[in-house]
Amino acid sequence: MGRIRQFVGMLLILLNWAAAQNYTPADAVALEQHGNLAEAARAWEFVTRHNPRDAGAFASFGVVLSKQERYAEAAAAYRKALSLDPKLPGVSLNLGLAEFKQAHFHQAIPPLKVAVTSAPNDVQARTLLGLSYYADKQFAKAATHLEIAARSNPENTELQLTLAQACLAAKRYPCALEGFREILRREPDSAAAHMLMGEALDGLGKTPEAIAEFQAAARVAPGQPDVHFGLGYLYWKSHSYEDAVRELQAELSLDPRHAQSLLYLGDIEMKRNDLDAALDYLRKCIEIDKSIRLAYVDMGAVFFQQKAYPNAVSALKRAIELDPSSPDAHYRLGQVYRALGESAQAQKEFENVRRLHEKQDQNLAEKIPSASDSPSVH
């Protein structure tokens, strides 16, 4: 009798388990409403498996998965829903958000564009699209959408700051200045806003005004990363080399591996004709970051002055590898070849210089990394 009762008990458990697996959409909705997300996900998985053409079921499955922060699975469910019904309301926005939450900003853009097209006044969709463009470094498009979103949410300082940064990166300097001025009006002691304002002014060629903003930032937050470098670079640009050295050294006291500070210190020593000091700074620079082209150009110039021509050729060829379109390295390499008596090679490099368009000097905004490389939504 005991064995029979045990068998009957096991059978009842199996029957109850089997019955529980026969979920309906109503069961899934009820489970979700009661906060049982794990069971609700299992229910929607059952429903979609048995109704593979039900777009709404896949969309609902995606919502539950998103609530569990299972964003990759949610995105797959949303894509399936859209493949069955491309016009299903809200699913494109949910797909874009699921990709955004995974930091898949490039993949988030297409569904968010669909969401914005179908609902142009949806601030969330517009903000997500602008932030995705920003993270994908499509700054002009980011500024266009963030400008619209910011008008609907003027008190969101983070959004206003990202808009101003997008304008700055897109070289829309008046837009950037307007944004940073508004931020400084609300937060006059914001070192970051002073620095970004300085970058925008530098982009407009207003170097003295840019220096004033960086000086303000340095007063407010002398330990802020890049504040002394930015000020030193602006002094370097103004040929105020003593002031530049002071600020660049201050940056190095905070970060001894600040490659850009080492670069400009080396450049200043080269201009002062202290070639050994220049080489020391430049070598330290490329030990930290082998991708800084100007360091190799300056090293080539120093080696040329020292008549160390093979070293000069090697350094300048590396600079050309990093950017074949910049004429300065080609010109200096032509000079080296001419000094070596290699007239044909020299002529080839001088012809390269003539073919290349003059490249504008980089402005400060292109030298200091963005403060908001990975946007977030609150």
Image (spheres, rainbow, N blue to C red):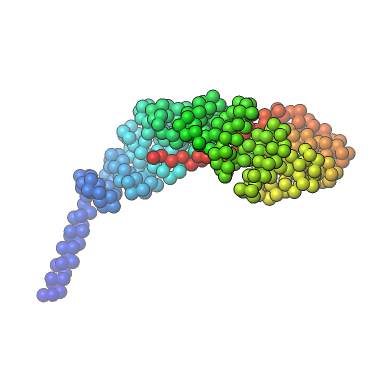
Quadrant where the C terminus sits is top left
Q: Is residue 104 above or below residue 124?
A: below
Residue placed at 67% from the left, 29% from the top? Answer: 360
Q: Position of residue 197 (x, y in %)?
A: 55, 31
Residue placed at 77% from the left, 46% from the top? Answer: 277
Q: Is residue 5 above or below residue 60?
A: below
Residue placed at 48% from the left, 41% from the top? Answer: 374
Compared across the picture, whether 288 is left or right of 106 comes to: right
Residue placed at 75% from the left, 37% from the top? Answer: 329
Q: Position of residue 118 (x, y in %)?
A: 36, 28
Residue farthest to the top, as pictured: 174
Q: Is residue 23 above or below residue 241?
A: below
Quadrant where the N terminus sits is bottom left
Q: In the rendered image, is residue 294 in sight?
A: no
Residue farthest to the left, as pictured: 1
Observer-nearest of 308 and 317: 308
Res 368 → quadrant: top right
Observer-nearest of 297 and 161: 161
